[in-house]
Image (spheres, helix red, strand yellow):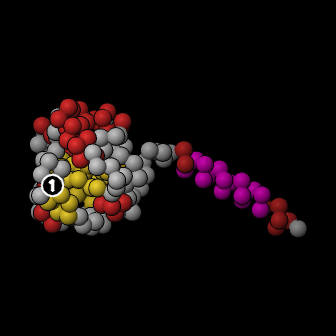
């Protein structure tokens, strides 16, 4: 009967340990199963010139930031002026993916181009993901989301939500510089 007295104590200690560990984790940091794995392949039309395409193979040999955004996305609008500034630093080229999750929206390409015309274009190139299949391959579940990809096409960092100055300066820039060495 004495061995059963310790069960509630062990359960209580386990619960407290679980809660203490949880308190020290950043709730905004969601681990991605794609980190240190090959980036999903894509071959998509460019936003401004749909007869031209850009593929993941075209990106081999360079470190780049792949930013998924949408003209319909309020957080993307908030992030955008910072991306315009970051692009001027030339630390890492930023490629945009205009993430269109509605297959039947014929005007979405025009909306994406209007968005960039109004707010500036920080992207080295922008591709158009009609239907969002590439976004699904990358595990994007809300825009904006960004991926830092190395020269071998391996995802090294994922940012869920807008890229803040803190994330840019303390995570993306140092890692991009390291990957470019």
Q: Does residue 19 belong to the magenta stretch?
A: yes
Number of other residues with Cα within 10 Å of mark 1, as a class: few under 14, some 14 to 19, many 20 or more = few
Magenta stretch in the rendered image:
7-21
- Of 43 and 180, which appears nearest the observer? 43
User: Which element carries disc 1, helix, strand or loop?
Assistant: loop
At horizontal 54% and vertical 44% (from top left) the residue drawn is 23
Q: Measuring from the top left, give residue 21's x and y in whole percent.
A: 54, 50
Residue drawn at x 27%, y 55% is 129
State left or right for residue 75 relative to residue 156. right
Task: Examine the rendered structure and indicate whether residue 159 appears above or below residue 89.
Answer: below
> x, y percentage for residue 115?
23, 37
Would you say residue 164 sits in the magenta stretch? no
Residue at 66% of width from left, 53% of height from top? Answer: 15
Specify the quadrant that holds the N terminus: bottom right
Residue 63 visible in the snapshot: no
Query: Which secondary structure class fits the magenta region best?
Result: helix
Viewer-proximal residue among 140 and 154: 140
In the rendered image, which quarter contains the C terminus? bottom left
Residue positioned 23% across, 53% down in the render: 128
Residue 38 vertical placement versus 132 (above, below): below
Q: Nearer the viewer, residue 43 or 17?
A: 43
> In this orientation, does residue 139 appear?
yes
Q: Quadrant of residue 39?
A: bottom left
- Estimate the x, y position of residue 166 in percent, counting from the top left: 30, 37
Q: Position of residue 119 (x, y in %)?
A: 21, 32
Above or below, comparing residue 172 to residue 37 in the picture: above
Name the residue that disc number 1 marks.
50
């Amino acid at each position: 009967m004495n061995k059963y007295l310790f069960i509630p104590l062990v359960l209580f200690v386990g619960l407290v340990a679980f809660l203490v560990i949880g308190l020290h984790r950043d709730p905004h940091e969601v681990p991605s199963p794609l980190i240190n794995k090959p980036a999903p392949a894509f071959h998509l039309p460019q936003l401004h010139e749909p007869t031209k395409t850009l593929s993941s193979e075209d990106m081999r040999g360079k470190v780049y930031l792949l930013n998924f955004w949408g003209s319909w996305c309020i957080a993307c609008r908030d992030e955008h002026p910072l991306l315009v500034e970051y692009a001027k630093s030339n630390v890492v080229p930023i490629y945009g993916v205009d993430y269109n999750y509605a297959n039947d929206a014929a005007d979405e390409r025009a909306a994406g181009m209007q968005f960039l015309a109004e707010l500036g274009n920080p992207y080295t190139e922008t591709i158009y993901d009609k239907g969002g299949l590439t976004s699904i391959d990358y595990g994007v579940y809300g825009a904006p989301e960004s991926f830092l990809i190395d020269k071998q096409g391996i995802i090294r960092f994922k940012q869920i939500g807008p890229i803040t100055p803190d994330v840019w300066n303390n995570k993306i820039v140092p890692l991009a510089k390291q990957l470019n060495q």
